[in-house]
Image (cartoon, rainbow, N blue to C red):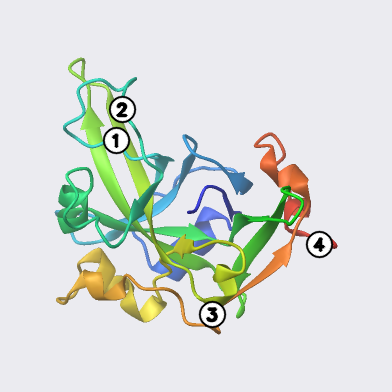
Amino acid sequence: MCGRYASYLPAEAIAELFKVSGPLPNIAPSWNVAPTQGALVVRRHPETGERRLDILQWGLVPHFTKDLKAARKPINARSETAAASGMFRGAFAARRCLVPADAFYEWKVLPDGTKQPYAIARRDGAPMAFAGLWEGWRSPEGEALRTFAILTTSANATMAELHDRMPVIVEQADWPLWLGETPGDPASLLHPAAEDVVKSWPVARRVGNVRNNDAALLEAVAA
């Protein structure tokens, strides 16, 4: 499960890291990206083959959706079944993307039944690149909407202390394969991060409120 994450690097820094082309979107940094919000996504342009950085809405709407209000809009897709799922099959085959993230949050259930939020980030301090799927949808009136979902997999040992799932983190060497720039099997990348890749620490419960959005959300607190 991945239901909140931080993406605060400026678009210019993300563009340099991911080697994207084209105009850069204007988006404010966020330490508490939540479902239905817009977020930065790296995609491969289907005609030019260039990497582009765009703002997409978190919560995937398949192109065949008839009723937008009644649509499920999943924020996550299970990596074990995405390639065969009617909801995600088309996107997995042709519309894979990378979702830059500086950290993500997970909630650990404590013995007293309360939940303690934790932040998870790379040990090396680099941004993460989640494996994502994107879709374009258009209403009968011509309204266009571009959305995405984050692929999840089973937890590694670090994450298993908090939750049984984690986002699929794509290493930089594998970005071309995931984006379809080089031949290979993208499904081979859908596995938990190696044990030395991520670290976690407890953070304040105020992260649970989407209206709280500041750098202090990532400060460590006593568990």
Which residue sits at x=51%, y=54%? 11
What's the residue at 48%, 69% (across, down)? 155
Q: Which of the pair 161/56 is nearer the observer?
A: 161
Assess whether mark 1 and mark 4 are in contact (beta carbons under 8 angstroms): no
Q: Say which residue label 1 marks.
A: 61
Number of residues whose C-alpha sits closer than 10 Å to that of mark 4, classed few (under 14), some (14–19) or many (20 or more): few
User: CB under 8 Å between callouts 1 and 3?
Assistant: no
Q: Nearer the viewer, mark 2 or mark 1?
A: 2
Q: Quadrant of residue 202?
A: bottom right
Q: Is residue 17 toward the left or the right of residue 47 in the image? A: right
User: Residue drawn at (48%, 63%), measured in percent from left and top?
Assistant: 166
- Which residue is disc 2 drawn over? 71
Three-letter code for the amino acid on which mark 1 is drawn: Val
Quadrant for the C terminus in the image: bottom right
- The residues bearing labels 2 and 1 have C-alpha atoms spaced at a distance of 7 Å
- Callout 1: SS: loop
Callout 3 amino acid: Val
Q: Which residue is mark 4?
A: 223
- Of helix, strand and loop, which one carries label 3? loop
Mark 2 residue crowding within 10 angstroms, few (<14) / some (14–19) / many (20+): few
Tell whether 25 sits left or right of 97: right
N-term-proximal mark, 1 vs 3: 1
Position of residue 217 measured from the top left corner of the image (x, y, whole percent): 74, 52
Which class describes the residues within 10 Å of circle 3: few (<14), some (14-19), or many (20+)?
Answer: some
Farthest residue toward the right? 222
Q: How far apart are the alpha carbons under marks 4 and 1? A: 37 Å
Element assignment for label 2: loop
